[in-house]
Image (cartoon, grey):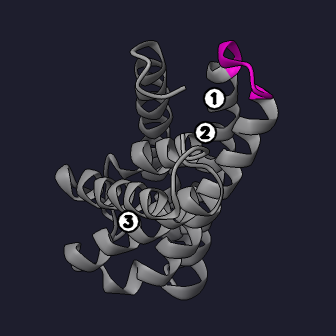
């Protein structure tokens, strides 16, 4: 999506995806008993990885998600969110490109492989954050259920949007 864009256009598109990630994260928030919340942000985290790729996708996913924690009042999650969401986007982007290998018809497989791997990192990342830094002990395991559900929604949403955007020829 960014191959034929100027540096300024790439920056604007990256910032737009970061803002969309922030809004998607804040739009619907379902509180978790462990102190976090489930949201739709992973849909845009993964879509940023698939469409922007590389550092642009990493920046949009990490910064957009971190800003949602800031605006949502979850300041103590900001460093973890930046790291986890950036790592998710990097993983999803690389696996999407490896599986796809330039073939449009393999986008679905690439999105699923990249999405599942990225969401696994998210679930484990927030579990370890709750266990080690928030000192939640055994209760940290409860984050796995909510985050896994959020991850599944993110994979389905991002894959559906990717396919729709490709079929409409908005993206190549």
103 in magenta: yes
Vertical relation: 99 (above or below) 22 = above
First in residue order: circle 3 vs circle 2 = 3
SS label for mark 2: helix
Q: Which residue is mark 2?
A: 115
Find the magenta span and give its range: 100-106
Distance of mark 3 from mark 2, alpha carbons?
18 Å
x, y percent for residue 49: 57, 48
* Quadrant the C terminus occupies: top right
Distance of mark 3 from mark 1, alpha carbons?
22 Å
Vertical relation: 168 (above or below) 84 = above
Pair 3/1: label in front: 3
156 or 168, which lies in front? 168
Distance of mark 1 from mark 2, alpha carbons?
5 Å
Q: Are marks 3 and 2 in contact (CB under 8 Å)?
A: no
Q: Which residue is mark 3?
A: 64
Q: Which residue is mark 1?
A: 112
């Amino acid at each position: 999506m960014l191959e034929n864009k100027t540096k300024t256009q790439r920056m604007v598109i990256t910032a737009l995806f970061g803002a969309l990630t922030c809004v998607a994260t804040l739009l619907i928030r379902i509180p978790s008993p462990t102190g976090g919340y489930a949201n739709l942000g992973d849909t845009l985290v993964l879509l940023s990885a698939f469409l922007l790729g590389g550092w642009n996708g990493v920046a949009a996913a990490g910064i957009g998600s971190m800003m949602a924690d800031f605006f949502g009042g979850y300041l103590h999650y900001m460093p973890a969110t930046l790291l986890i969401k950036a790592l998710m986007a990097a993983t999803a982007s690389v696996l999407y490109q490896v599986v796809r290998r330039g073939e449009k018809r393999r986008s679905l497989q690439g999105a699923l492989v990249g999405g599942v791997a990225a969401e696994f990192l998210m679930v484990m990342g927030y579990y370890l954050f709750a266990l080690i830094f928030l000192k939640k002990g055994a209760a940290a395991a409860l984050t796995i259920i909510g985050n896994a559900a959020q991850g599944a929604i993110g994979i389905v949403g991002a894959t559906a949007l990717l396919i729709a955007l490709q079929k409409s020829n908005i993206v190549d």
